[in-house]
Amino acid sequence: MMSAVVWKTFGSRRSTSGSPGISSDPTEVPFSQQQRKKSDFFQSVRTNKKETSDGYQSLFMRSFLALYLFSCHLAFFCNVFLMGENPHWLSLVTYGTFGSLIQLFTALVICEAVHFVLKFFCKRKKLFLIGNKRLRHFLVVSYAVLISTYGLFWATQPPVIKRVSIPIPKLPKSLEGFKIVQLTDIHLGPTVGKRHLETVVKMVNDLKPDILVMTGDLVDGTVEILRSAVEPMKDIKAVHEKFFITGNHEYYTGDVDHWFQHLTQLGYTVLHNSNVKLPRTGVKAAQQFCLAGVDDIDAVHMGYHGHGPDIVQALSTCDPTQPVIVLAHQPKVAKKILDSTYKVDLILSGHTHGGQMFPLMVGAYLINPFFAGLYHYKGQSYVYVSEGTVYWGIPMRIGSTMEITEITLTSR
């Protein structure tokens, strides 16, 4: 749809070629027949030259636009055929153009909508700068180029460290200042690879977490394809343990069981609708908290047997006298847990990416009960939604932040 609109606007012959004509002045003194012939001859020559020049320009613009739109659609094929240890240049180019198409289409819709409104309410034909069609299109293209460049730049930067202190009333004194580092939505795949992950691993290790939690969407491909790309995950150091839950993209790979096995080999405890008491050894029950994790809800939508969020299985064995922290990839599942009969103190989620870029953030905000950041639900429980550690597919960040979250537990 976006391609069709952009092609009709910028690529149709009507939009790229002019309609030359000769206007006459009724007050003009009539030429003699000989003068008229000479005038018509020179006018014809000038017109032919202009038409030839306009024709070449039109052909060039249409060819460029066709190549651009082809690149946008090629991104989805790169998602299947060009995944590996690090992104292929073609994947980066095609996903980059796809992201710019979204910006171009959005700017075009907004600009034309504003023009329509102004034209409807203004009686004058001249509607400021936006009344000129060519100028509108120039503004749209300029915006798309500038904002896409901005988004591409920020996607190349390392994630920021977001530090959040969360009060847990039942927190034992021995766990005061307990540090949880959350990663989520790394999306190893067509445009995110081993080099990105190595940067993340170094930043996490500098934080010296007590535990590391990976709350889903680590990968966009199978173990066979991304084995080398995910290898740096084993190098993350934590005082106690490292934990993993599924996101929707683990199920999209169709290889989630193999990912469970491989991540276990890399030193992760997979919380598959289950929980653990931390610290595991050397302390009494009164000095522990319950860490639970649930599967992603898209496992149910896809009919993935034996998977899907099971709140009862995940939380029924948690000690109600201990603090309860839950890992749930999607905020929709977090809301279901909060509305259940189980009392939880904190839920850590991801999935939304903070919208990743305009205008996608509008939809992400509307369809999720929690969008980004820290929420205090009904004055009882906390929910933290990370904006994601890297990005999905399109290598752009516009109006959102890539983050590694350092969560400190406190009793105050």
Image: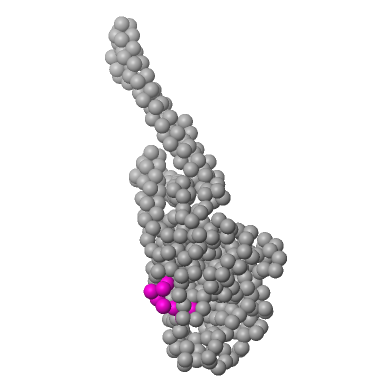
Q: Looking at the image, which is closer to me, 222 or 367?
A: 222
Residue 278 shown in magenta:
no
> Is 62 placed above or below 384 here?
above
Residue 136 figure quarter: top left
Can you say whether 73 is above or below 85 in the image? Answer: above
Say if residue 182 shows up in the picture.
Answer: yes
In x, y percent, where is residue 178?
45, 84
Tell me the quarter of the picture where residue 289 sits. bottom right
Q: Is residue 298 left or right of residue 233?
A: right
Colour mapping: one colour
* Res. 376 visible in picture: no
Q: Which residues are magenta?
A: 204-211
In this view, 121 is above or below 21 = below
Q: Nearer the viewer, residue 304 or 128?
A: 304
Front residue of 209/105: it is 209
> What residue is shown at x 54% (from left), y 64% (from top)?
217
Q: Residue at point 39% right, 58% down?
A: 156
The residue positioned 57% from the left and 92% from the top of the image is 285
- Judge from the rendering whether residue 107 lies leftward or rightward of residue 338; answer left or right: left
Please tell me which residue lies in front, 210 or 216: 210
Is 256 drawn above or below residue 2 in the view shown? below
The quarter holding residue 225 reads: bottom right
Task: Indicate the position of residue 206 as horizontal and vertical percent values.
Answer: 38, 74
